Amino acid sequence: MLNAWLDCNGGDCSLALSLDLRRAALVLDAGSAIDMLAALKARDGRPQLYVRLSPLDSDRVDAELDAILPLAPDGVVLAACRGGADVQRLGVKLAVREALHDLPAGSTRIVAMVAARALLGLSSYVGCSPRLHALGWDADALAADLGVRNRDASPLRTARDWVLIAARAAGVAALDATLDGLPGLRAETQRARDDGFSGKFARTVAEAEAIAAAFGATG
C-alpha cells in the first residue's frame, strides 16, 4: 500500500513515499485512502509524497487524478509506462487539474515505471517532459511481462542496465528495484550506487534505513 524510495545525490538522500490507491482500496475504502494521503501531507517535516497511478490506458486514471490532485502531491508514479508519449499524455492531464485547483503549473512530478514494451524505445524519454523526475523498474512486473522466473535472469539484468542508461540520457534520476530484501540489501544497494543509480525502492522502514546507509546518507 505504501512504498518508499531513497532519492540520493552524492551523500544526501531524501525519502519519498508513494501510496498505491489500488492496493489501498483492498483494505480501505477510497475515501480513507485519500484521507491517509491528506494526513501525511499535513505533517511537518514530511517526506516527498507521490501517488502510484494505474497504467495510463486504464479507465481508473482520470478518477485517481481527480481524487488526488486537490491534495497537491509532490508527484505521481506511473505504472507500466510505455514511453515518453505516455509521460506527455499524463502531463496534459496533470496540467488541466493543476489549473483547476490553482496549483503551480508543472509542479506535479512524474516517476515512470518502465514497462517491458518500452525497453526497445527508451530514447523516447529523452526530452519528453520537464515533469519527468525519474525512471524506475519493477522486478516483479518486468519478470511477468518477459516470462522470466528467476529474478537474476539475464533479461532482467539487461532491462535494469537499460533503464539506468535511459535515465542518465534523459537527465533524470534512476531508481533501482529491491530484489533480495534485508539479508542482502546493503550489498545490493552498494552495487546500485556503484552502478550509478540515484536511489532504490524500499518496502519497509528497515529496508529504507539500510538503503540510506549504503548510499552514505548524511541525514
Image (spheres, helix red, strand yellow):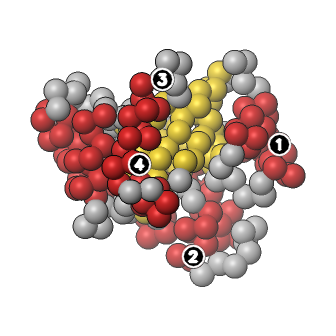
**Precedes in sequence: disc 1 or disc 3:** 3
Q: Callout 4: few (<14), some (14-19), or many (20+) C-alpha neighbours within 10 Å? A: many
| Foreground tag (1 vs 3) | 3
Of the numbered discs 2 and 4, the one sitting upstream in the chain is 4
Q: Amino acid at mark 3?
A: Arg
Q: Establish if 13 lies above or below 123.
A: above
- For the C terminus, which image quadrant? top right
Instruction: Kindly report the distance in space between the C-alpha atoms of the residues bearing marks 1 and 3.
Output: 29 Å
Instruction: Identify the residue shown where x is 49% and y is 18%.
Output: 44
Q: Earlier in the sequence, mark 2 or mark 3?
A: 3
Name the mark on residue 43: 3
Kind of residue sitting beneath label 4: Ala
Seen in the image, is 212 located left or right of residue 7?
right
Residue 186 quadrant: top right
Q: Is residue 103 visible?
A: yes
Corner quadrant of residue 129: top left
Residue beneath disc 2: 144
Looking at the image, do the residues carrying marks 2 and 4 touch, with CB atoms under 8 Å apart? Answer: no
Q: CA distance from mark 1 to mark 2?
A: 26 Å
Residue 186 image label: 1
**Residues at marks 2 and 4, CA–CA distance in whole angstroms:** 27 Å
Residue designated by label 4: 33
In front of the other: label 2 or label 3? 3
